[in-house]
Image (cartoon, grey):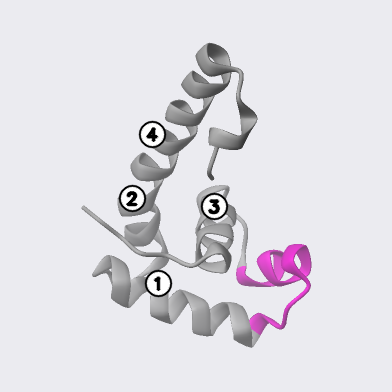
Amino acid sequence: MKMELTHRERQIMELLCEGKTHHQIALDLKIYPKTVESYLTRLYRKLGVHNRSSAVAVYAPLWTCSICGNLYRWKYHYDFRDVIL
């Protein structure tokens, strides 16, 4: 599945995958909780889900694979400019 997420949307999804609440995400990113809710509404639509747990279920495997792929590049290529999170 190809998803085009902005940098901020990826940040929010990663914090959501860590189990953080709307309020905690807002504090971490220094934005208003209502802004987090707006991002989540947009993310749910992009992911084709209707709630937080479904969004995490869809996004978490993609996020984990992305991290593993980047760790592989760090270990074998030694060129940190290749790493894109």
Magenta residue check for 37: no
User: Local crowd at mark 1 within 10 Å, few (<14), some, or many (≥20)?
Assistant: many
Tell me if label 1 and label 4 are in contact, CB under 8 Å. Answer: no
Instruction: Classify 85 as above or below 69.
Output: below
Q: Residue at x 31, y 72 (%)?
A: 46
Percent across and percent down for residue 22 are 62, 71
From the image, which quarter does the C terminus lie in?
Answer: top right
Marked residue nearer the N-terminal end (3 or 1): 3
Instruction: Classify 83 as above or below 57.
Output: above
Return the residue at label 4: 65
Marked residue nearer the N-terminal end (2 or 4): 2
Write down the quadrant of residue 50 in the picture. Answer: bottom left
| Residue type at numbered disc 1 | Leu
Looking at the image, is mark 4 or mark 3 nearer the viewer?
4
Q: Residue at x 50, y 22 (%)?
A: 73
Return the residue at label 2: 57
Q: In whole angstroms, how far apart are the C-alphas of marks 3 and 1? A: 12 Å
User: Local crowd at mark 2 within 10 Å, few (<14), some, or many (≥20)?
Assistant: few
Tell me if label 1 and label 2 are in contact, CB under 8 Å. Answer: no
| Residue type at numbered disc 2 | Ala
